[in-house]
Image: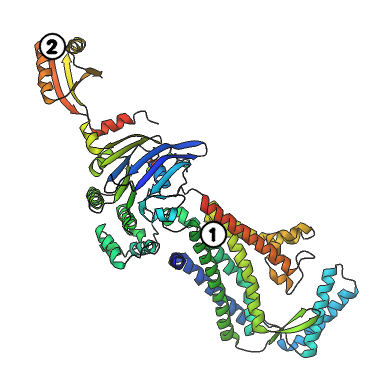
Amino acid sequence: MTEPVAQMKNVKKQIGNKTIIHGISLDVYPGEVFGFLGPNGAGKTTMIRMIVGLMKVTEGDIYIQGHHVNKDFQKAIAQVGAIIENPEMYDFLSGYENLRHYARLSVKPISKDRIKEIVELVGLSGRIHEKVKGYSLGMRQRLGIAQALLHSPSLLILDEPTNGLDPAGIREIREYIRRIAHEENLAVFVSSHLLAEMQLMCDRIGIIQHGRLLQVEKMETLLKEKKRTVQVNVHPKKQAMEYLESLSWSINNINGILHVEIEQKEDIARLASDIVKSGYQLYQLNEKHESLENTFLELTKEEL
Amino acid sequence: MYLFKMLQNEHLKIYRRIGTWIMIGLMILTLLVFALVSKFILNEEDSASWERQAQAEITQIEERLNSGAPLKVEQDYLEQELAVLEYRLAEDVPPLQSDSLWGFMADTTNLIGIASLFTIVIAASIVANEFSSGTIKLLLIRPVSRGKVLLSKYVTVISFGFVMLTLMIGLSFILGALFFGNSGGASAFLTYSNGQVVEQPMISYILSLFGYKSVEIIMISTLAFMISTVFRSSALAIGFSLFLMFTGPQFVQLLSSYDWVKYILFANTNLMQYINGVPMVEGMTISFSIIVLILYFILFTIVSWAVFKWRDVAV
Ligand SMILES: Nc1ncnc2c1ncn2[C@@H]1O[C@H](COP(=O)(O)OP(=O)(O)OP(=O)(O)O)[C@@H](O)[C@H]1O
Ligand SMILES: [Mg+2]
């Protein structure tokens, strides 16, 4: 097994006497896009702030390429490129000057060609010499990503990176993120509260809520595990339900609609013939995929 | 090397702001207006009659001394003045005239408050602005210690202060030469030291005026820098430092009969009090003031550093 790029060991964060992160342990590996998924206020940004050393951990340890973030900050952070929350830039400088500003603070020298390459990559070539003041949110986001990639980090941390991008932009960035992760063996840590987006971008997903990591799963596993149900509208409901249950179907009555669990396609035909044979009146029968969305909503159900 | 690049960045960030150039423009404008006013509006008393004036002052001082000066310090001061005036008459050294190059330059030291004000503005905003714009997050995730980030900012503030001061000296020299030429006025400045009157070359006197004032600029901007680092608000830092700068000396004056007042920062920032004048509080010496200033300086920088280094960044 490859060594993880980032290791979080039982990380806790307390602000005042409020515990925001309750002991999160997590490894992020090179070549993978890891999605940090959670509703608003779950603690994603707080966790990211600790990974990049903007906040000190209250308890636990974070290592990046083996360097402890708080004890060996400079070595650890040299491996990291990040955007945290909004892509704030010096708006009285041009996009290019902003990049030059950060390039000067890099350990390894960054050539003008490298800056040019990155600018092209994020699609800002046409406007890079304009003042950031006149940039749209999406353009700032792109500049933020450029800034994070400039020094070829081995860990890329993106806090809600598609915030403010148009669909084409989202797709572009998503594809780029997946490509560099897989081709250049970069570890990418992306946070989002948008599930659909994570589904398309990530190889692995961790669901966080109230500062706790509820589940970490490979994307494939999560997609495979979805439950299949068939919604049935039948009359009279009560008797039909009892009858079907006697035939060992497992049924949930939700708002007058019977949700019948099935395992495979053939079950649908079997269920239909069972109902028809029973003599009850069948009005409607349709299959419903439990999406990851529902899994997510279910996991993070009890809200605020 | 790394620090050099950081300084480059910090300088870029102040000199690319319009506000900075407005301040520099205002400074130039003020000096220009001041020169015009000195040249065309202020009516100088006839400089040929300085001997008569000196004579009149001597008579006044003698009267005051004979009536018994109330305070020992005042008596000392009057006696020094007397010695200088007598020396002036005996050796024929005319006093500084406002309508001369040196006189104009000496007068512009009264405008140093403008340089202080603008340096305070930079000191108060250089850290706070990064917080209010959110750029602090991207700045602090570079492979540089927070201490160095703060140092580069502090050095930039001080360098800005010196740019302002140099600009003032240079401009007052040019404007002075332009408007007043090398006409008339004193060639030497008279001071009283170790019981006798000494002649000091005018240029060194004027540079020392600026030099002493720069101590004040450094102290007040270090204070503003600290406030802005601790509270991350430039408005608060500007307001508070200006308030202290203007009321501090008054406050000290008001309470000068109490001995503890001499430990207050503003009793010590004006080192000129030891050159021509009486100390704010009886018994203060220049070395005492320097030690007090150094202690305040250490306090301000340590507080700024510790807060900046240890605080969680949650903007
Ligand atoms: N400086 C702070 N002081 C006190 N509480 C804080 C602080 N920063 C964050 N919190 C609290 O910590 C919790 C997590 O906040 P965080 O910003 O990490 O959430 P998030 O998962 O990034 O949410 P979002 O999706 O809205 O960005 C919130 O309840 C927030 O109120
Ligand atoms: Mg967040």
| Relative to B61, residue A286 above or below | above
| x, y percent for residue B76 | 83, 73
Residue A280 is tagged as: 2
Under circle 1, the secondary element is helix
Kindly report the distance in space between the C-alpha atoms of the residues bearing marks 1 and 2. Answer: 80 Å
Residue at the (63%, 75%) spot, across then down: B210
* Residue A41 visible at all: no
| Relative to A167, residue B67 above or below | below
Residue at the (74%, 74%) spot, across then down: B276
- Number of residues whose C-alpha sits closer than 10 Å to that of mark 2, classed few (under 14), some (14–19) or many (20 or more): some
Q: With A213 as the anchor, is B123 left or right in this view?
A: right
Disc 2 marks which amino acid? Tyr
- Number of residues whose C-alpha sits closer than 10 Å to that of mark 1, classed few (under 14), some (14–19) or many (20 or more): many
Task: Provide the chain ID for the residue under circle 2.
Answer: A
* Residue B268 visible at all: yes
Under circle 2, the secondary element is loop
Residue at disc 2, CB closer than 8 Å to ligand 1? no
| x, y percent for residue B274 | 73, 71
| x, y percent for residue A294 | 26, 31
| Relative to B29, residue A73 above or below | above
Q: Are marks 1 and 2 on the same chain?
A: no
Q: With B41 as the anchor, is B121 left or right in this view?
A: left
Q: Determine which quarter of the picture holds residue B248.
A: bottom right
The N terminus of chain A sits in image quarter: top left
Q: With B76 as the anchor, is A190 left or right in this view?
A: left
| x, y percent for residue A96 | 33, 64
Q: Which residue is mark 1?
A: B124
Quadrant of ligand 1: it is top left
Q: Determine which quarter of the picture holds residue A28.
A: top left
Report how many numbered discs are placed on residues in the image.
2
